[in-house]
Amino acid sequence: MNTETEKRSLLLEMIAFSTVDGHLHKREYDFLWLVAQELSIDLDEFHDLFHQENTTSIIKSEFQRIQQFYRLALIMYCDGILHEKEAKAIQQIAIEMGLNPNATKRVLDLMKNAPNAIIDPNLLLRVFQEQHN
């Protein structure tokens, strides 16, 4: 991510998605805070983001869109409860990102069956690359 605006936008999208089920679980909050730290966002700014409206920006790089999709999927699984609203929302977000629906479904299935929902990054990329052929 290059700009502060992009960093904030990505984190805002993650925050909005984490509350789509009506609750913010502590594990989701902790995961979001971890991401914020990686993006060099301080605690005050992080807390302020929870009170801002999410204006989605288009991510140009397919690699960055895949990364963001995976981050959102991790949030979806991190509280240990898969809500129907989350499952529908992530599929819609993936479509809006321009990601292949078959690849996103396959990644979600792999995550569902993986310990802690974590899959190898190379496998993640390979699933999306397979769809290009």
Image (cartoon, rainbow, N blue to C red):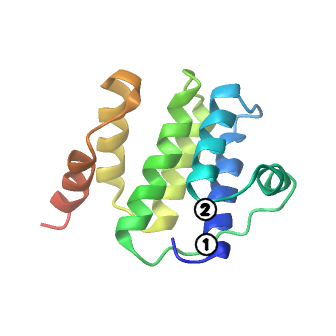
Which residue: 30% across, 51% down? 102
Which residue: 59% across, 59% down? 39
x then y, percent, for residue 105: 35, 44
Verify CB contact (< 8 Å) between mark 1 and mark 2: yes
Residue 63 is left or right of residue 49, and the answer is left
Which residue: 74% across, 33% down? 24
- Distance, label 1 to label 2, CA atoms, is 6 Å
Which residue: 29% across, 34% down? 110
- Mark 1: amino acid: Glu
Which disc number belongs to residue 54? none
Under circle 2, the secondary element is helix
Q: How many marks?
A: 2
Which disc number belongs to residue 6? 1
x then y, percent, for residue 133: 12, 66
Residue 54 is left or right of residue 75, and the answer is right
- Categorize mark 1 by other alpha carbons within 10 Å: few (<14), some (14-19), many (20+): some
- Categorize mark 2 by other alpha carbons within 10 Å: few (<14), some (14-19), many (20+): many
- Mark 2: amino acid: Leu
* Residue indicated by mark 2: 10
x then y, percent, for residue 30: 65, 34
Under circle 1, the secondary element is helix
Report the front residue among 101 and 43: 43
x then y, percent, for residue 80: 54, 21
Residue 54 is left or right of residue 63, and the answer is right
**In the current view of this chain or complex, which residue is farthest to the left?**
133
